[in-house]
Image: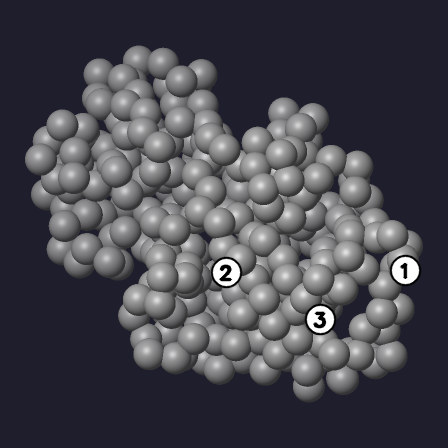
Amino acid sequence: MRVRRSRGIQALAAAVVLSLGLTACGGDDEPTVEPDEDVTFDAGTTMAELNEQGAITIGTKFDQPLFGLRGPSGDPEGFDVEIGKIIAAALGIPADGIEWVETVSANREQFIQDGDVDIVVATYTINDDRKELVAFAGPYFVAGQTIMVLEENSDINGPDDLAGMQVCSVEGSTPAERIRTEYPEAELVPTDAYSNCLEPLRNGQVDAVTTDNVILSGFVAQNEGEFKIVGEPFSEEPYGIGLALEDDEFRNFINDTLEESYEDGSWEAAWEATAGEVLELPEPPAVDRY
């Protein structure tokens, strides 16, 4: 069932206030999203339960500049984090009512299935295999897999150059699986977090790191002069919001919230305050109401 709201798009825009300071790029001010205080939900829905609790648990990455990076406060900062705040605000939950739980690629489905988190917003690519285990709202962004090497490297210019090379990526991620299946002549070096690929790349233990372009762009920006991205994206990675399988009412609510954030400007403001300090503003993707 749909949420019942007593305000239109203009009122929603007024309720969502974003302070456009830098987050993952090191600014002093954090974007804030004011909670919607004038919202009611049908009894028995996940939305009603979370609204009554005044709290939500959100899984995200803690090691990815621009999207989810643990900040000086101990809380993560970035575009994924701001998307989580937009969803929480639509539930009537303020930012301080969010419990952030670090998730890595290998544990996202398990955390959702076990109820350790209510949703996951963590550079989480929607694919058919994962849809068997969890539900997805969105996408709210579409990335593409690319390759990062040392600044002075001239041998690797795209995925076809990875044969015989040691390539670091995260176990349980779609980029790692793509290297295994589509580029088997590369030697995959799996780890549990992309940040754990950086030192091996610096000291020559691996030749390249591969994952989504926006994640690698964050590492390049954070480590100026050390790394570079080579070649064009060679996949499409639609980022979705993971939630419990078959919770269709909650999934529809999140999709509604995403679409409203496109219209009222809060999605764009969240991007410009985080990833937009490094990357151009993309077009928001159409949500997939499968």
Q: Residues within 10 Å of mark 3 (few under 14, many from 20)?
A: many
Would residue 265 be seen by someone viewing this image from the given angle? Answer: no
- Identified at 64% across, 62% down, the residue is 55
- Mark 2 Cα shell of 10 Å, populated few (<14), some (14-19), many (≥20): many
Q: Residue at x 25, y 36 (%)?
A: 197
Dot placed on the residue nearer the N-terminal end, 3 or 2: 2
Residue 81 marker? 2
What separation in Å lies between label 3 and label 2 (alpha carbons)? 17 Å
Foreground of the two, 141 or 203: 203
- Answer with mark 1 or mark 2, whichever residue precedes in sequence: 1
Q: Pinpoint residue 148: horizontal percent, then vertical percent.
A: 26, 41
Crowding around mark 1 (Cα neighbors within 10 Å: few <14, some 14 to 19, many 20+) is some
Can residue 50 be seen at all in this image of the molecule?
yes
Q: Position of residue 182 (x, y in %)?
A: 43, 19
Which residue corresponds to mark 1?
A: 42
Q: Amino acid at mark 3?
A: Gly
| SS of the residue under disc 2 | helix
Instruction: State the residue at coordinates (43%, 56%).
Output: 67
3 and 2 marks in contact (CB < 8 Å)? no
From mark 1 to mark 3, how far is it between C-alphas?
Answer: 14 Å
Q: Is residue 255 left or right of residue 265?
A: right
Q: Earlier in the sequence, mark 1 or mark 3?
A: 1
Q: Residue 179: x, y in percent?
A: 39, 23
Q: Nearer the viewer, residue 265 or 40?
A: 40
User: What amino acid does circle 2 point to?
Assistant: Val
The type of residue carrying mark 1 is Asp
**Residue 53 location, quadrant:** bottom right
Residue labelled with disc 3? 92
Horizontal and vertical percent for residue 221? 26, 59
